[in-house]
Image (tube, rainbow, N blue to C red):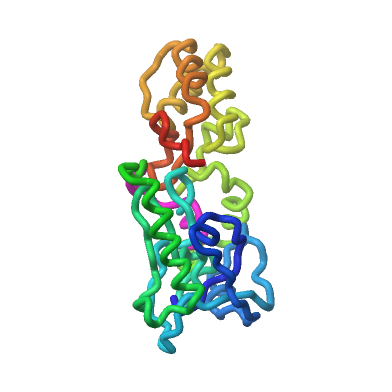
Amino acid sequence: MGDGAHVGPTTHDVFNQPNKVRPETESVEPPGNYRARHLPIEPNIPDKMDIWHVQRTGKGYGGVVSRAYGFTDSPDAEALVLGLNAGKEYGAVGIGRHGNILQWGYSAPPSKMTDEGQKLFINCICYIAKFDGKLPLVRRQSSPRENVLRLGILSNRMDKKELQYYIENFELIYGHRIDKELEMLGIHSNRKIATLEKLIELLEDQQNSETALKVLKRYTGLAFEKPEQWHDWLQQNRERIFFSDFGGYKFFVAPRGYLDWK
């Protein structure tokens, strides 16, 4: 990652409190690696991109804090700024937050930051203070589902037919395979609240109850046996349930009060 950042929405607190950050933008051609690492499920890379400079080292030192894939799959993580980089894919995170940890990928001291970069740095420090004590909810247990496509393309191990199959069933990727049992049940995603609702409904279906229970346990790590137990769990926690690929392709429940900042 270099000195630059991609221009995005500036409504977030880190662009407005306590300092108003007004990035001076310029239009540039995207680095060649953006197209080389582009996945078929992603929007096309435009011919020009608006960027601004957080620092001016002339050397472009710095490092992305996360790849683009899966960083925000839990509610304790935010991509605050996307870094302009010459090695990773578009969307790699230049500045991020994970729980109470601020991840600043730029390398320069404040003396070599732009005026707007300095303001942003101060704002980020002020912003992260509000998350004191809110430890990250998810620890990495597996890779994001995008990796199946990325590694398949890079290694040339997928022919066009197989690649298209994974693209069409992207929402059913479980680790490095497609969840055939969910597919058999007529469910088209493994990470939506609607998936839990349908599986709990199928517990009352004698033909599919066994498979539905097996899949519920797979994606929650819970051991309830009775439909009413699953129903109560969902109703009591619905607003705090989220799904994480990184967390092992499972649904989690955020602690009460954890999401009050939103």
Identify the residue at horizontal 52%, vertical 72% (top origin). 5
Where is 129 relative to 23, above or below?
above
Residue 168 located left or right of residue 93: right
Query: How many badges with numbers are in the image?
Result: 0
Identify the residue at horizontal 39%, vertical 64% (top origin). 65
The image position of residue 221, as x and y in percent, is 37, 29
- Image quarter of residue 159: bottom right
Residue 93 located left or right of residue 186: left
- Image quarter of residue 48: bottom right
Identify the residue at horizontal 48%, vertical 47% (top origin). 73
Magenta residues (range)? 138-150
Please indicate, yes or no, whether residue 39 appears anywhere in the rendered image: yes
Please indicate, yes or no, whether residue 160 appears anywhere in the rendered image: no
Q: Main secondary structure of the magenta part?
A: loop
Where is 157 relative to 258, above or below?
below
Camera-side residue of 191 and 103: 103
Identify the residue at horizontal 65%, vertical 80% (top origin). 27
**Is residue 101 within the magenta segment?**
no
**Is residue 147 within the magenta segment?**
yes
The image position of residue 94, as x and y in percent, is 45, 67
The image position of residue 240, as x and y in percent, is 48, 31
Where is 46 relative to 13, above or below?
below
Camera-side residue of 57 and 137: 57
Q: Quadrant of the N terminus?
A: bottom left
Camera-side residue of 69 and 132: 132
Residue 108 located left or right of residue 90: left
The image position of residue 3, as x and y in percent, is 46, 79
Q: Residue furthest bottom?
A: 58
